[in-house]
Image (cartoon, helix red, strand yellow):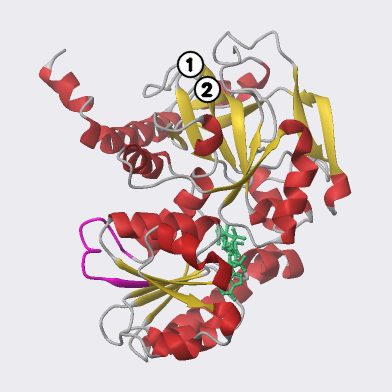
Amino acid sequence: MSATASVLFHSSNMTCVRRLEYKRWLLRLSTSTNVKTLLCRQSSPFSTSSRCRTIMPAWVIDKYGSNEVLRFTKNARFPFLRFPNEVIVKVFAAGLNPLDVSMRGGYGAATLSVKRDPLNSMQSGSDFPLILGRDVSGVIIECGMDVKYFRERDEVWAAIPPWKQGSLAEFVVLSANEISHKPKSLSHTEAAAIPYVATTAWSALVNTAGLSKDNCGKKRILILGGSGGVGTFAIQMLKAWGAHVTVTCSQNAEGFVRGLGADHVVDYTAGPVEEPLSALDKFDVILDNVGGDTERWALNLLKPWCGAKYVTLVTPFLHNTDMLGIADGMMQTAATVATKALKHLMKGVHYRWGFFAPSGPALDEVTEMVDAGQIRPVVDETFSFSQVPQAFQKLENGHARGKTVVQVIKEGDDL
Ligand SMILES: NC(=O)c1ccc[n+]([C@@H]2O[C@H](COP(=O)([O-])OP(=O)(O)OC[C@H]3O[C@@H](n4cnc5c(N)ncnc54)[C@H](OP(=O)(O)O)[C@@H]3O)[C@@H](O)[C@H]2O)c1
């Protein structure tokens, strides 16, 4: 192997390599005279292995509603590669999130529909049949011709953007930039508990709050709602990076979050948490997984004039666009966030909204932390593929301790 090649394969450089490759691919795609040809090859996959398949088993919805809209079918359309940097993944396990329950009921439909079909070229109702499920762990069965970093039969995991077809199916198509090699130390079922909450926590804490493994050492972080999917991942990541972590959760989750590393726990079921929290030293960062009236008091817990940040994951963005339409909804959203950010800036603290962002490179780093024993999956309950409605029901009932996972294919089954 040449010196250049060995540098490329050095693990610490993998993320940069992936970013470079992706940028190069985007550049080539934008300048290529063959763009149209590439995009039009919808009925002809970029490689050969799955050409004979046209249908697959999946859980779909044909309209928005409650649990009864979930329908199992053996005849869902087999996904195909539309871009040369995509892969087809055979799904071994899928993870569900509160977002899946909301999407089943139509939450975010206005924005997601535009994202799926920006030119509005399809008929109305073209979002259906819709496949839910935001996490996947599985095996690549087919790679597009521009995929360099992955090969067929690689075990991968990913968080699937909500505008794409989900993982409650035997196969799913993803961009190579969204996937990452699955941690070797985890089974597929365990792995499916991590990607969506990990990429959400990463986006909120790293991209929005500016935290990293190099600057967390002396920071005091507060996680509001620490016992759910995002909270349990965030506690472990921040503890691995050396932060001091305070968590709010219900009393019966206290031992559980302490077991994940939380330094201080405040029980929200014992009464308003503002009082016990304001008796503590002030915080550098607050991650809010609860929303509601927390904004009224939480920003007073931050250190003023020190760059301290409050990041909430509970935002009205999709609700606004559902209610007001895309243009008015976005204007309303921009006005709301700008007003709040300005108001709090004048008090010396930063107010931010955090959002899920799909990211293979972020998952590469999570893979390393998992294989180093710094992060473990927190599976609330595992369901079989025939029990998907029960899995949704469980999620809907709330009080999750980590993630709800669906085993789509038994481990060890042949491809
Ligand atoms: N903006 C985005 O892109 C984005 C992405 C992902 C998630 N989210 C949102 O972020 C939130 C968290 O997601 P998740 O996946 O972690 O949800 P989850 O698994 O349902 O966890 C929520 C947790 O919050 C706890 N909780 C409820 N009320 C509380 C309160 N008043 N104080 C403290 N804890 C409380 C619950 O614990 P108990 O059972 O003990 O009550 C539950 O464990 C959800 O609202 C989700 O919609 C947003």
Along the line of sight, the residue nearer the viewer: 227 or 76: 227
- In the picture provided, is 53 more to the left or to the right than 35? right
State which quarter of the image contains the C terminus.
top right
Task: Name the spot of residue 349 as percent of width and height, x first.
Answer: 36, 83
Task: Kindly check if marks 2 and 1 are in contact, taking CB atoms under 8 A apart as contact.
Answer: yes
- Residue denoted by label 2: 139
Residue type at mark 1: give it: Arg
- In the picture provided, is 42 more to the left or to the right than 309? right
> Magenta residues?
210-221
Query: What residue is shown at x 52% (from left), y 22% (from top)?
Result: 139
- Provide the major secondary structure of the magenta segment: loop
Query: What residue is shown at x 39% (from left), y 85% (from top)?
Result: 301
Instruction: Please say whether residue 263 is visible from this viewpoint.
Output: yes
Disc 1 C-beta below 8 A from ligand 1: no
Say whether residue 203 is magenta: no
State which quarter of the image contains the N terminus.
top left
Along the line of sight, the residue nearer the viewer: 386 or 1: 386
Question: Which residue is outermost to the left?
Answer: 3
Query: What residue is shown at x 41% (from left), y 35% (from top)?
Result: 26
Along the line of sight, the residue nearer the viewer: 39 or 164: 164
Badge 1 crowding class, 10 Å Cα cut-off, few under 14, some 14 to 19, many 20 or more, is some
Q: Is residue 210 above or below residue 61?
A: below
Q: Is residue 159 above or below residue 157?
A: below
Total marks shown come to: 2
Instruction: Return the disc, 2 or 1, that comes first in the chain's sequence.
Output: 2
Secondary structure of residue under mark 2: strand
Quarter for ligand 1? bottom right
Task: Name the spot of residue 28 as percent of width and height, x first.
Answer: 39, 29
Task: Name the spot of residue 40 as percent of width and height, x first.
Answer: 63, 23
- Residue denoted by label 1: 153
